Image: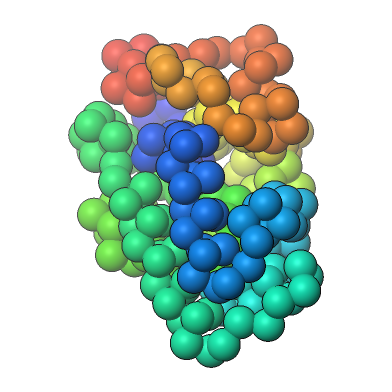
Amino acid sequence: MRYDAVIFDLFGTLVHTVSPDAYAGMLDELSMILGVPAGAFTTQWRATIDERESGLLGSIEEILAATASAVGRQPSAAQVTSASDRWQTSCEDWLVPRDDTIATVQAFRDAGSKLGLLSNCSAEVPPLWVSSPLAPMFDATVFSCAVGAMKPHHLVYDTACELLGVRPNRCLFVGDGGSRELTGATAVGMEAILLRAPGEGHTWFDAHYRQDALEWSGTIVTSLSALIKRGV
């Protein structure tokens, strides 16, 4: 067995990257439900990604209310609840595993590797993850909003290793290169592989949040199943 543990990113790795049009459409719907100007809401939403994903803005409802308040609106409790439901429905649709995800994850389990999930995300993801078909396959999950730090901060990688009971130099990290996650993984001693899935290099945050995807000079695969074919 080459690795004691394999740690996966979530969005753009185990599940597809969310398309810019789908994400923009969701924000438009949320702003309409909350009674907030769409342009101002979207600008504020994108400006506070670090606060959301570090858990600083709190729960789903608190995030929505705070974002609306920041652009001068105070939505009703019913509006916030309705927007929360819509946000969770969108996210649930985005958490469908790639076609080769389950087989790849199972292959690592069969080989004896522990499995970890490490995701930068806000409060909508953790409650939906527990219903994912992937959840029972993982030994540890680390969500940035729960630990108060985001990739590439060493705390998230250290937490994953602690939960898994493994040393970083015995771990493989696999991700799509968002938030300098590969750089962060190698900085703590992990081996890292970039998943560069065809047709998914066009997300709205590429220029700011996927630097590793653009600059990575290490190992690259174009599918999860290729990890198994490479014998990793």
138 shown above or below 105: below
The answer to which of 39 and 67 lies nearer the viewer is: 39
Marker count (numbered): 0
70 shown above or below 113: below
Could one spot residue 158 in this view of the protein? no
Point 36% across, 20% down: residue: 223
User: Residue 169 at what x, y percent from top left?
Assistant: 62, 34
Point 47% across, 53% down: residue: 26
The answer to which of 103 and 108 lies nearer the viewer is: 103
User: Residue 214 at what x, y percent from top left?
Assistant: 66, 17
Q: Is residue 111 left or right of residue 33?
A: left
Q: Is residue 100 left or right of residue 197?
A: left
Point 30% across, 14% down: residue: 229
User: Residue 22 at what x, y percent from top left?
Assistant: 43, 42
Screen quadrant of the N terminus: top left
Q: Is residue 79 left or right of residue 147?
A: left
The answer to which of 128 and 46 lies nearer the viewer is: 46
13 shown above or below 216: below
Screen quadrant of the C terminus: top left
Taking the view exactly as shown, the residue that stands out farthest to the bottom is: 77
Point 69% across, 68% down: residue: 67
Q: By what rule are the colours in the image chosen?
A: rainbow
Q: Is residue 190 left or right of residue 99?
A: right
Could one spot residue 46 in this view of the protein? yes
The answer to which of 85 and 215 lies nearer the viewer is: 85
